Amino acid sequence: MAEEVAKGRGLFADRRVKIALWIAVAEALITAIRGDISKVTVIVIAIPVIVFHLLAGRTLDSRLGRTVSFTLALSQAFAVLAVIVAFLVGALVLILAGVFAAVAIVLLLMDRDRPARAK
């Protein structure tokens, strides 16, 4: 991966990153579509995968093992990031709804206090 970035091809030119992104996309879609798989489940699954990569996956003797460990850990990191963004967007939607409701109430109260115009 470092060689591809050094050649100017960029991070997303790396095949492992592309595979990790597609795994994260699939995981996010399954989480969004299926009601029985919660966002907490995604995080609980991601923790041991990422910890394994950090503690043992980077030092495996097999190059394939290191590549698989990296790809799986990166896909889980992307999935957790998607969960966090979904949580923040959901919270943002609720906050915006509250702001819109407050503005609507203020506008209604201001309109009620005005005297009616004569035609």
Image: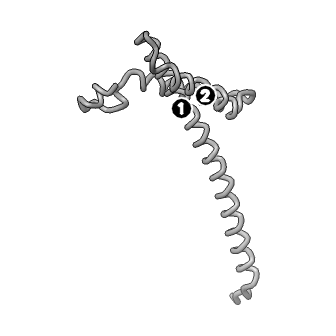
Looking at the rendered structure, the secondary structure element under dot 1 is: helix
Report the amino acid beneath label 2. Answer: Ala
Query: Where is 20 relative to 105, above or below?
Result: above
Query: Where is 114 relative to 6, above or below?
Result: below
CA–CA distance between discs 2 and 1? 7 Å
In the visual, does 105 lie left or right of 61? right
Considering every residue shown, the one lying at the far left of the view is 7
Q: How many marks?
A: 2
First in residue order: circle 2 vs circle 1: 2
Q: Quadrant of the C terminus?
A: bottom right
Residue 95: percent from left, percent from top: 67, 57
Q: Quarter-wise, where is residue 48 in the image?
A: top right
Residue 39: percent from left, percent from top: 67, 34
In this view, the residue in front, 93 or 53, is 53
Residue at horizontal 73 percent and vertical 70 percent from the top: 105
Q: Which mark is residue 77?
A: 1
Verify CB contact (< 8 Å) between mark 2 and mark 1: yes
Query: Where is 115 relative to 43, above or below?
Result: below
Residue 109: percent from left, percent from top: 75, 77
Residue at horizontal 34 percent and vertical 25 percent from the top: 1
In this view, the residue in front, 62 or 26, is 62
Residue at horizontal 43 percent and vertical 10 percent from the top: 62
Callout 2: 10 Å neighbours few (<14), some, many (20+)? many
Q: Quarter-wise, where is residue 52 in the image?
A: top right
Looking at the rendered structure, the secondary structure element under dot 2 is: helix
Callout 1: 10 Å neighbours few (<14), some, many (20+)? many
| Residue picked out by circle 2 | 46
* Coloring basis for residues: one colour
